[in-house]
């Protein structure tokens, strides 16, 4: 009798580069997937004739396959692969916003007009912009991390101001630049999972080998205050390799 199996458990997926500087090497391992699905389909055309114009013979063609993965977690490597980009590690220029409430302890001198000093958490690069609670520009004096604003701008003790600036992160940053002319490369993808023997109830190892696939550039990230955390959908188009092979299923 034909042995039957239940299919449920999500795959772990390993991507091997088919070209570029990492050709033949594993470039990412995904073990936090929520779903992993594989679909194949083909087109057909038939000769029809006779009374009733019934199908007489049929030809199949244009076999296609696609794989869809949904990851519970994001990585910079995944973002880079989806955009055909590299990860540049090191320094980076960061935009920062800080909010302060002016108080008498921040007062720099007695008298009128009163001046108030706030201290930024980082040393700014270039221009520093200070706005009051209504979005009006404040005339600010900047020296290092210190920003001084005064009551001539209509702010005083108890006023809230917001300061906008950029600073240099000297090390430890990772940066991906999305280019309009760069796209994902080609990969061999290995999916590892288990299938359950219907007779014994035991899990048996099952592997899916996709010889040549290409990531689509589609990406959606949702940053929201409530609800479920974002998931990350990866769609892969499957191609035939040089021998015409697309997918291999192995139970072992």
Image: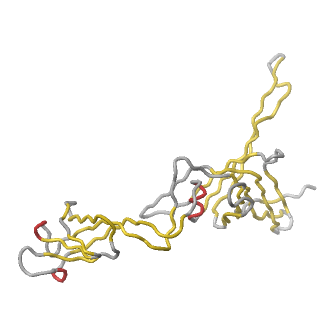
State the image coordinates of residue 61 (x, y, percent, origin top left). 78, 35
Q: The N terminus is located in which quarter?
A: bottom right
Residue at the outermost left position: 112
Q: Quadrant of residue 47?
A: top right
Using residue 120 as the reference point, say whether residue 66 is left or right of it: right
Q: Is residue 74 visible?
A: no
Please identify the residue farthest to the top as the structure is shown: 51
Is the image coloured rainbow, by chain, by secondary structure, or in one colour? secondary structure
What residue sits 84% from the left and 61% below the top? 251
- The answer to whether any part of residue 122 appears in the image is yes
- Considering depth in this image, is 151 or 73 the residue closer to the camera? 151
Give x and y (percent) for residue 56. Answer: 85, 24
Q: Position of residue 217 (x, y in %)?
A: 58, 50
Residue at (77, 45) in percent of width and height: 240
Q: Looking at this view, is 147 or 79 the one in front?
A: 147
Residue at 10% across / 75% down in the picture? 114
Q: Quadrant of residue 126?
A: bottom left
Q: Toward the viewer: 5 or 135?
A: 135
Q: Is residue 231 left or right of residue 61?
A: left
> Measured from the top left, where is residue 158 in percent x and y?
17, 74
Q: Quadrant of the C terminus?
A: bottom right
Q: Residue at x 26, y 64 (%)?
A: 129
- How many dots with numbers? 0
Side (left or right) of 72 relative to 41: left
Q: Quadrant of residue 53?
A: top right
**Residue at the extreme bottom:** 105
């Amino acid at each position: 009798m034909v042995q039957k199996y239940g299919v449920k458990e999500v795959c772990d997926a390993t991507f091997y580069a088919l070209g570029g500087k990492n050709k033949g090497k594993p470039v990412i391992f995904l073990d936090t997937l929520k779903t992993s699905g594989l679909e194949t389909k083909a087109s057909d055309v038939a000769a029809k004739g006779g009374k009733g114009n019934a199908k007489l013979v049929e030809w199949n063609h244009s076999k296609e396959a696609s794989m869809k993965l949904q990851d519970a977690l994001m990585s910079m490597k995944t973002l880079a692969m989806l955009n055909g980009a590299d990860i540049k590690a090191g320094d980076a220029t960061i935009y920062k916003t800080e909010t302060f409430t002016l108080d008498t302890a921040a007062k720099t001198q007695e008298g009128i007009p009163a001046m108030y000093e706030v201290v930024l958490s980082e040393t700014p690069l270039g221009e520093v912009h200070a706005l009051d609670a209504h979005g009006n520009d404040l005339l600010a004096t900047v020296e290092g991390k210190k920003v001084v604003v005064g009551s001539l701008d209509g702010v005083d003790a108890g006023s809230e101001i917001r300061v906008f600036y950029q600073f240099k992160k000297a090390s430890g940053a990772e940066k991906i630049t999305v280019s309009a002319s760069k796209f994902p490369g080609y990969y061999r993808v290995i999916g590892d999972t288990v299938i359950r023997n219907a007779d014994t109830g035991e899990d048996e190892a099952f592997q899916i080998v996709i010889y040549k696939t290409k990531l689509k550039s589609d990406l959606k990230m949702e940053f929201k205050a409530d609800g479920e955390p974002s998931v990350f959908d990866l769609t892969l188009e499957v191609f035939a390799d040089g021998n015409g092979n697309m997918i291999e299923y192995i139970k072992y």
